[in-house]
Image (spheres, grey):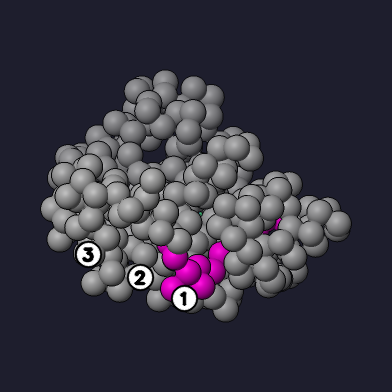
Amino acid sequence: MDDQPDLDAALDGEFPEEGDNDVVAQPSGSGAIRKPGAGLYIVATPIGNAGDITLRALDILRGVDAIACEDTRVTGKLLRRYGIRTRMLPYHDHNAAKMRPILLDRIAQGQAIALVSDAGTPLVSDPGFKLVREAKDRGLALTHLPGANAAITALVLSGLPSDRFLFGGFLPAKSGARRTELDLFRTLPATLIFYESAQRLAEMLTDVAASLGNREVAVARELTKLFEEVRRGTASDLSAHYTEKGPPKGEVVVVIGPPAEGAAASDAADMDGLLKQALQGGMSVRDAAAHVATITGQPKKQVYARALQLGTGGDGGEP
Ligand code: SAM
C-alpha cells in the first residue's frame, strides 16, 4: 500500500527522509503491537511536556498503518522518544485538499490512520476538521483519543470561573478587527479563552480592556513546560506589564473572566439592541425576552416588559 502511485504523487517530495524515524527505543506502551480496526484515530499529543501522552495513544500510534501529521520533523521527534516506527504522512494546510481523499480511501480499504497535530488536540486551532467531516460523511469509523490541550489547561489554572466558557481560537491580528470581534462577546456571561502570539499580547490586552471593560485576566504561558507561568491581573494592568517588559518568551493563552455579576448588558442600550435583533429576526416577544434574559442575566420580567414596548412599536419613551 505504501507505494501507491497516487500517494507518492500527492506527497510530492514531502515524504520524510529514509531513516528519519528509525531510532528505536523500547516500546513504552503495553508491549505487543496490535493493529487497530480500520478507521480514523484523532490522537492528542503533548503541548510541551513529552510525558503528557496516554498509554492508549502510544498503542494506537504504534499500531496504525500510518500517522497523518502536520510536520514530520515534529512528530518524528515524539515517535522516536517512544520507539514508534509507524510511517508518517504529511497533512497540513498546503496539501490537505490533496491528501484528504487519499487518507479516506485508505481507511475505506481497511487501513487504520491516526491524525496528530504538532501539539495538543488536532482540530483545536489545528488541521483536522474537514478530514473528520468527510470521514463522517463517508460513514467511516472515527474516534478520538483525548489528551493535552492548551485552552483547557489555561482555564483550569486561571482561577477564573470554569462553569461556562467560550473558546475563541485566535483573534484577528489587526486591532480594529480584533475589537470588532471582541465586541461580539461583550455581554456573554462566560469566561473567554483565546490563543494569542506573545508578540501581540500587550496590544491584545489593551483591546480587551477597551472592548470588554477592565476584567480579570490570566495569561498562561509555557504550559506543562519548565517555565510554566500564570500571571493574573486586570486587563489594563497586564497590558501595562507586557508593554513595559516586552513580549514574554514562548506560547501564551489568554483567559478573560466573565462580566461582573449583573453587569452584563446592564445598560439599557445593550438590552435594547439584543431585543431588537431578536425581534427583527422573527422571534415572538415572549421568545425574544427569554432569549435576552438568558444571555444578559437580567430578570425575565424586566426584559419581557421592555420587549413588549419594543415589540409593539414603542420605543420606551426614547426621543
Ligand atoms: N491544538 C493545540 C491545543 O490543543 O492546544 C493548539 C494549537 S495552536 C496552533 C497553538 C497555540 O496554542 C499557541 O499559539 C498558544 O496560544 C497555544 N499553546 C499551545 N501550547 C501551549 C503551551 N504549552 N503554553 C501556552 N500556550 C500554548
201 or 286, nearer to the observer: 286
| Mark 3 crowdedness (10 Å alpha carbons): few <14, some 14-19, many ≥20 | many
- Find out whether the residues at labels 2 and 1 contact each other: C-beta distance under 8 Å: yes
**Ligand 1 lies under 8 Å from the Cβ of mark 3:** no
For the point 49% across and 62% down, which residue is it?
Answer: 192
63 or 190, nearer to the observer: 190
Q: Is residue 63 visible?
A: no
Residue, disc 3:
304
Residue, disc 2:
297
Task: Tell me the chief SS of the magenta region.
Answer: loop
Q: Is residue 296 left or right of residue 58?
A: left
116 or 20, nearer to the observer: 116
Residues under labels 2 and 3: Cα distance?
13 Å
Task: Residue at the far right: name it.
Answer: 244
Q: Which residues are magenta?
A: 250-266
Q: Earlier in the sequence, mark 1 or mark 3?
A: 1
Numbered circle sitting on residue 261: 1
